Amino acid sequence: MGRLQPTFDGETVIVTGSASGIGRAVARRFGDAGASVLVADIDEEPKDGDVPTAETIRDDGGTAEFVRTDVTDRSALTDLLEAAREYGGVDVMVNNAGLFVGGSVLDLTPEEFERIHAVNAKGIYFGVQAAANDMLDRDDPGVIVNTASISSNLAQFDQVQYDSTKGAVRMITRGSALELAEHGIRVNAVAPGQIATEFIEGWTEEATEKAASDDLVKPVPLGRAGTPQDVASAYLYLASENADYVTGELLHVDGGWQAF
Ligand code: NAD
């Protein structure tokens, strides 16, 4: 099998929610590919207590900076784009920060509803908006990649509120792709399936066990949970010239779950 190895030398990439999990793997992959990476997160420390992402990228010989950012705060996103100008301005914006709130549609509180939508939907929307405006102000169109989910299309029990945010990400991606195409800005999303991260406490183990035991609403055809590394290449592909004619697309990286 061949191997695509996109290079991002001299380019500036922002990845939100990149202290841990999928975002961390994506940030590191862009760092390895030569980009200057802005690691944007509310926390600098990864959930597993490992070395912070920006530091790891620098240790590996790359260029990276941590910028503390709460994606629910629109002005923080504008400041983040401003910080990217120190590196020549953003070329690739990855809107990935997200969280999970479970619970029945019968019980969810307004505070819980607002919290999950503030990060997963509002955070993505204003991330797209801030990046696109910055690209247009600099007259330098780039690429935006959002993190959707298998839940953008598939309903599961006790997670209406999560599914609704990921459904929103799907339409934010498609709608902004449509509107920004004339400006030369592409907008796509990666839709991961069951990925072993500490997204929910203990999820790394739970996702691994559930996927292997078929203890899900449907089995994962490839028979295992994904890893952040499995997902990361999809972001680089969508951000690269290889995907020049791809916009408004959700690329599922889910071991075949969506196809089932
Ligand atoms: P994770 O918890 O390991 O990483 C999420 C990161 O987002 C963390 O570093 C966290 O600090 C950060 N974050 C949370 N709120 C933030 C905020 N307000 N501002 C900035 N950063 C914030 O989880 P993950 O599994 O890597 O999830 C990353 C994305 O992938 C999320 O959007 C999630 O919905 C999506 N996703 C995950 C799975 C899965 O099975 N793990 C499946 C589909 C989609």
Image (spheres, rainbow, N blue to C red):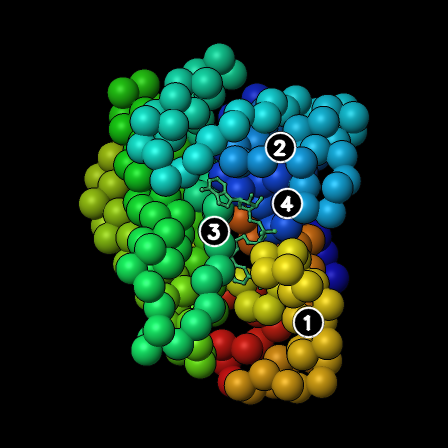
**SS under mark 1:** helix
Which one is earlier in the sequence, the residue at label 2 or at label 3? 2
Contact check, label 2 and label 3, Cβ < 8 Å: no
In the image, which disc is placed on residue 20?
4
Q: Is residue 224 above or below residue 9?
A: below
Q: Is residue 254 left or right of residue 88?
A: right
Q: Earlier in the sequence, mark 4 or mark 2?
A: 4
User: Residue 260 versus residue 52: which sits nearer the camera?
Assistant: 52
- How far apart marks 4 and 1 lie (CA) works out to 17 Å
Residue tagged 3: 98
Q: Is mark 2 within 8 Å of ligand 1?
A: no
Circle 1 is placed at which residue position? Answer: 206
Mark 4 lies within 8 Å of ligand 1 (Cβ measured): yes
Which residue matches tag 2? 44
Residue 54 appears in the picture as rendered: yes
Q: Helix or strand or loop: what does disc 2 sit on? A: loop
